[in-house]
C-alpha cells in the first residue's frame, strides 16, 4: 500500500451526531474517529449537522462521514457534499440511498443472483394472516429504512404480525416482514477492494437487537468465525459482489445469515443488508475485522479517509 501523507488531507470535517434515531451511536463513533485522526496529526474538526449550517462545510477540504441512519447514511448528506465539491468517505449518493433501503437492496441482490431471505412488503391493508402463512414462523418485521435494529420485532406465534407491523411503522412508512434464518449471523467488512475476515455474531439476547449491539457486554464476536476456510473465502467474494452491485465504494459492511450449522455443506447463506456508514464504537464490527486483518483502529480511519472521493 502507498504511504499516506496526512498533510495531504487538508482541513477535515468529521461529520457525526445528526438528526436520526441513531444520533447517540453516531456521537460515540464520531468522537472515537476524531480522536484517532488527531492522534495521527490530521487537521480534523467535529461537525454536527444537527447544530450547524451545512454551508459551513465550504471551509473544509474533505469530510469523514460517521453519521448513521437518515440524513447521513441515505444519500442526503452525500448529495450536499457533491454539490459543494467536497470529497467524502464511503459510498456515493445512489449506493447510500439504495443501501439504506432494505427492501430495494434485496430486490437488487436477487436480480444479480444473490440469495436473500423470503420477505414481503407490509402496509396497513396487508392480509397479516396470509403473510404469516406464506413466510412461515418465526419471522422478523422491520422498518425498511432504519438501522441499528430500531423498530425490529420477532413474530413467533400466529396473530402477532399486526402488532409487529404497527411498531415498525412508527419508524418508517415502508415495513418488511422477513422469514427468520436461524443458523447464525455473520458480517463482512469491506475496506477499499478487500473483504476483511468474517465475524460471527452470537448475542445472548434472542436476536442482535440495539442493546446487544451497543449496550450489552455479553455479545460474543468470533473472528476467526466457525466457517470452513473455503466457505469463508467464497462468502467474502460474494460479499464484494453484493457491495459492488449497489455501487458501494470506500468502506462498508455486508451482513448475511446461515440457515444451518457452519460445518454442514448443505447450509446456505442468505444476504441480509448492507451498511454504507458503519459504526466505529468500541462495540463496532468493522474495527474488529480490521484488527483481525492486522489493521489498527488508527490505521483504519486514515485508510478510510484516504479513500474519500466525489462522484
Image (spheres, grey):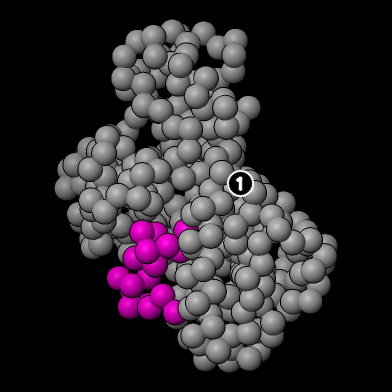
Asked which quadrant contains residue 160, the reply is: top left
Q: Quadrant of residue 170?
A: top right
Q: Residue at x 58, y 38 (%)?
A: 145
Which x, y percent locates residue 82? 78, 63
- Considering every residue shown, the one lying at the far front of the view is 51
Q: In the rendered view, does 51 fall on the left or right side of 254?
A: right
Please, what secondary structure does the residue beneath circle 1 have? loop
Which segment did they paint magenta?
278-298
Q: Position of residue 184 (x, y in %)?
A: 26, 42
Q: Is residue 277 left or right of residue 197?
A: right
- Looking at the rendering, in which quadrant would you find the C terminus? bottom right
Report which residue position mark 1 lands on: 20
Q: Residue at x 42, y 62 (%)?
A: 281
Residue at x 58%, y 85% (from the top left corner): 42
Residue at the spot 26% in from the left edge and 50% down from the top edge: 219
- Residue 193 image position (x, y, % from top left): 50, 69
130 vs 242, nearest the viewer: 130
Q: Is residue 8 left or right of residue 242?
A: right
Camera-side residue: 17 or 132?
Answer: 17
- Magenta span has 202? no
- Residue 259, compared with residue 224, is above or below; it is above
Vertical position of residue 175 compared to residue 13: above or below: above
x and y, in percent, of residue 237 in the image:
41, 58
The count of marks equals 1
Task: Work out whether residue 115 can be spotted.
Answer: yes
Residue 196 shows in the view: no
Amino acid at each position: 500500500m502507498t504511504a499516506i501523507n496526512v498533510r495531504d488531507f487538508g482541513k477535515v470535517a468529521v461529520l457525526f451526531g445528526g438528526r436520526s434515531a441513531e444520533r447517540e451511536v453516531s456521537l460515540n463513533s464520531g468522537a472515537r474517529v476524531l480522536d484517532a485522526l488527531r492522534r495521527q496529526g490530521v487537521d480534523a474538526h467535529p461537525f454536527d449537522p444537527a447544530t450547524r449550517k451545512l454551508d459551513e462545510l465550504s471551509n473544509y477540504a474533505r469530510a469523514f462521514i460517521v453519521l448513521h441512519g437518515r440524513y447521513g447514511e441515505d444519500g442526503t448528506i452525500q448529495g450536499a457534499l457533491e454539490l459543494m465539491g467536497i470529497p467524502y468517505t464511503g459510498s456515493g449518493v445512489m449506493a447510500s440511498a439504495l443501501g439504506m433501503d432494505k427492501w430495494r437492496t434485496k430486490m437488487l441482490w436477487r436480480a444479480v443472483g444473490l440469495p436473500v431471505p423470503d420477505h414481503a412488503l407490509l402496509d396497513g391493508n396487508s392480509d397479516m394472516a396470509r403473510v404469516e402463512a406464506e413466510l412461515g414462523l418465526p419471522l422478523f418485521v422491520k422498518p425498511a429504512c432504519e438501522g441499528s435494529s430500531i423498530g425490529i420485532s420477532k413474530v413467533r406465534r400466529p396473530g402477532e404480525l399486526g402488532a409487529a407491523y404497527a411498531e415498525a411503522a412508527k419508524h418508517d412508512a415502508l415495513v418488511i416482514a422477513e422469514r427468520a434464518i436461524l443458523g447464525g449471523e455473520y458480517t463482512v467488512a469491506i475496506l477499499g477492494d478487500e473483504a476483511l475476515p468474517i465475524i460471527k455474531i452470537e448475542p445472548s439476547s434472542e436476536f442482535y437487537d440495539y442493546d446487544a449491539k451497543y449496550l450489552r457486554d455479553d455479545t460474543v464476536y468470533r473472528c476467526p468465525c466457525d466457517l470452513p476456510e473455503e466457505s469463508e473465502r467464497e462468502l467474502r467474494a460474494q460479499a464484494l459482489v453484493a457491495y459492488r452491485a449497489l455501487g458501494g465504494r470506500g468502506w462498508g459492511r455486508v451482513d448475511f445469515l446461515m440457515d444451518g450449522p457452519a460445518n454442514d455443506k448443505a447450509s446456505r447463506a442468505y444476504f441480509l443488508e448492507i451498511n454504507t456508514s458503519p459504526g466505529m464504537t468500541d462495540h463496532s464490527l468493522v474495527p474488529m475485522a480490521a484488527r483481525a486483518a492486522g489493521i489498527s483502529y488508527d490505521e483504519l480511519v486514515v485508510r478510510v479517509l484516504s479513500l474519500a472521493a466525489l462522484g
